[in-house]
Image: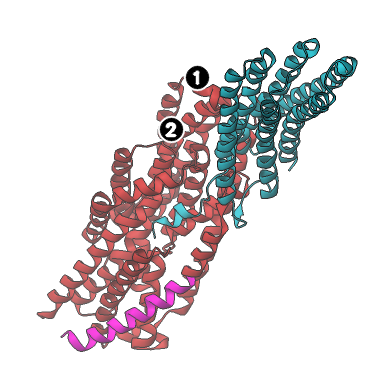
Amino acid sequence: MANMLANIFGTSPVLPLEKHVHIAYKCVRELDEFFAAAITGDWEKASRFRDQIIKYEHEADELKKEIRLHLPKSLFMPVPREDLLELLLVQDKMANRAKDVSGIVFGRRMKIPDEIAEEFQEFVRRNVDAAKQARKSVRELDELFTSGFRGAEAALVEGLLEELDQIETDTDDRQAALRWSLFGVEKDHGPVDVMFLYQVIELTGEIADMAERVGRRLELLLSH
Amino acid sequence: MEAQYIYIGLAAVFGIFMAWGIGANDVANAMATSVGSKALTIKQAILVAAVFEFLGAVLAGGAVTSTIRKGIVDSDLLANTPELLIYGMLASLLAAATWLLIASRNGWPVSTTHSIVGAIVGFAAVGIGIDAVQWSQVATIVMSWVVSPLTAGFIAFLIYLSVQRLILSHEDPLAQAKRYVPVYIFFAGFTITLVTILKGLSHVGLDLSLSASYALAIGIAVLIALVGTFAIQRIKPDPKAEKKQHFHTVERVFAVLMVVTACSMAFAHGSNDVANAIGPLAAVISVAQSGIVGARSALPIWVLVIGGAGIVVGLATFGVHVIATVGEKITQLTPSRGFAAELAAATTIVIASGTGIPISTTHTLVGAVLGVGLARGIEAIDLRVVGRIFVSWVVTIPAGAILSIVFFFIFKTVLP
């Protein structure tokens, strides 16, 4: 009966959500080194980073299930449960995209054309930046809950999200430029390889899209 | 009259057992908030609880004790059969203790206050007669069980809202916290001291005029606030921890405040819940000694002391573990949230104690926590459990009543 007080508290999803975005970011971050290795054709090195990506993606997946399990409908929270679940989902998708991209590149031992290698690497890096900014924003979640989603803390998060938007716009621009560069040299490479290259560019760009959607979700929480 | 010693002896054993149970279980709810938020260590919490539970019981526990002792049963009807009151009070103590034991074995969230009041009403209505119950008084008590969590919730809501507006959503929350937390400390100190002085001190032989009472309460509150301010000024920001959690240092300021509200909470709990154990005991003692029901004898202070001591022993033997367990589970109550809940609950409870109304301290605290939740302060509250608390609330009263009726008829046949 002493549990009466203890039991009215559900498991708070806040810190687990922060932990989840951290893992998702770590997963995405490995892409940078992975591509660096892939561009030089060092597949042994690339496989090590690929293993890391798979490991983190799996970790994020497990944590996602765990968080969902502890978010029953009977919970009374300052923000809608659906918004938190949606936030979790898009966070998880960042990790999923990292896994998908690395899977295609590694599975086909894809050669990134030298002409676009540097531009490509830079594009990947910006996507990692977007994920990093998403992590930075989500990590404010506990402070947001404490301050009741208003005042200086809310303004701070809004600033972070604005930055996130800028990074995402930048990745979009780079994606278009990278496609254009690839278009310029595509005749010199195998058609199937080029098709897959376009797909890899597309999927990589989705990481920043997901990061931006993480931002949208946080914004929704702010507006409640 | 040989039998009187048997009665008093039995009542003392049951009463002390009940006080022990309150100390072992209920106190945890009052203290765990402070332990969970790391405002106090377990050892400090035990010390604070022991001192302030005892003070609360002795200084401000008189009014509620008197309600339990003679406010529920109409003593006029028992003038010719004083032994019936003795059997009934013994049965009530045993019934409440038994029900609490059954409930805690099964993990049901039940309240000591509800059990004992249900038990007394039960034996009086069935064992003696429907008219033996002072129904208007009982109605007031039951109403207060609805009102007290609501009141505490409302106060907690307002307090936490003010904390958010004045401190947490501000650009420089630390400076704001250092400015306003002493005010909250003053408020906490003032309410508790004032109610104690106005309602509690008369039976320890102190009788102050109204203005003197206010002056004394303000004086003590200012003193507490000054000590608190001194402690707050010594808190220096920790940039490393601050980077991970912007409110780290701010919460440490609130932790100082929480030490004060923890004392208030322990005091409030002692002042209201000691009656559950010693109210019936006091009734038995007064009837057994004088042989008259409703004798206008004052409540002997040593009875309050026994109750307070029983609670402290229960706390030291068993309550320690419960506090630790509950404290671990309620980490969501950071000092800024926990203090709001504790201050609201303690204020509500102390006012009820002053008025002589037995309420459930735990339910009041739960109401206060929900209030903080409504101010968007708590990350996740499980409404299923809140519903279960409400159900057990309804079940406990008839359960206590039925058990006490059974024990009453057993005592009536067995005892001399």
Q: According to the image, label 1 marks what residue? A: B240
Label of residue A200 in the image: none
Disc 2 packing (10 Å; few <14; some 14–19; many ≥20): many
Q: Give the range drawn in magenta.
A: B393-416
Quadrant where the C terminus of chain A lies? top right
**Rendering colour (chain B):** red
Residue at (34% x, 87% y) in the render: B128
Dot 2: chain letter: B
Secondary structure category for the residue under label 1: helix
- Name the kind of residue labelled 1 in the image: Lys
Q: Nearer the viewer, residue A73 or B153?
A: A73
Q: Which comes sooner in the sequence, label 2 or label 1?
A: 1
- Asked whether B240 or B89 is in front, the reply is B240
Measured as percent of width and height from the top left, residue A30 is found at 61, 23
Q: In which quarter of the image is the N terminus of chain A?
A: bottom left
Expressed as whole percent of the image width and height from the top left, the position of residue B39 reads: 41, 36
Q: Mark 2 points at which residue?
A: B256
Is residue B51 visible in this depiction of the protein? yes
- State whether the magenta stretch is mostly helix, strand or loop: helix
Which residue is located at x 72 percent, y 31 percent?
A211
Q: Mark 1 lies on which chain?
A: B
Color used for chain A? cyan
Distance between the Cα atoms at labels 2 and 1? 21 Å
A13 up-or-down from A144: above or below: below
- x, y percentage for residue A218? 71, 36
Is B395 included in the stretch rendered in magenta?
Answer: yes
| Residue B245, quarter of the rendered image | top right
Query: The residue under label 2 is which amino acid type?
Result: Val
Q: Position of residue B294 (x, y in %)?
A: 30, 77
Badge nearest the viewer, 2 or 1: 1
On whether disc 2 and disc 1 are found on a single subunit, the reply is yes
Q: Is residue B120 above or below residue B221?
A: below
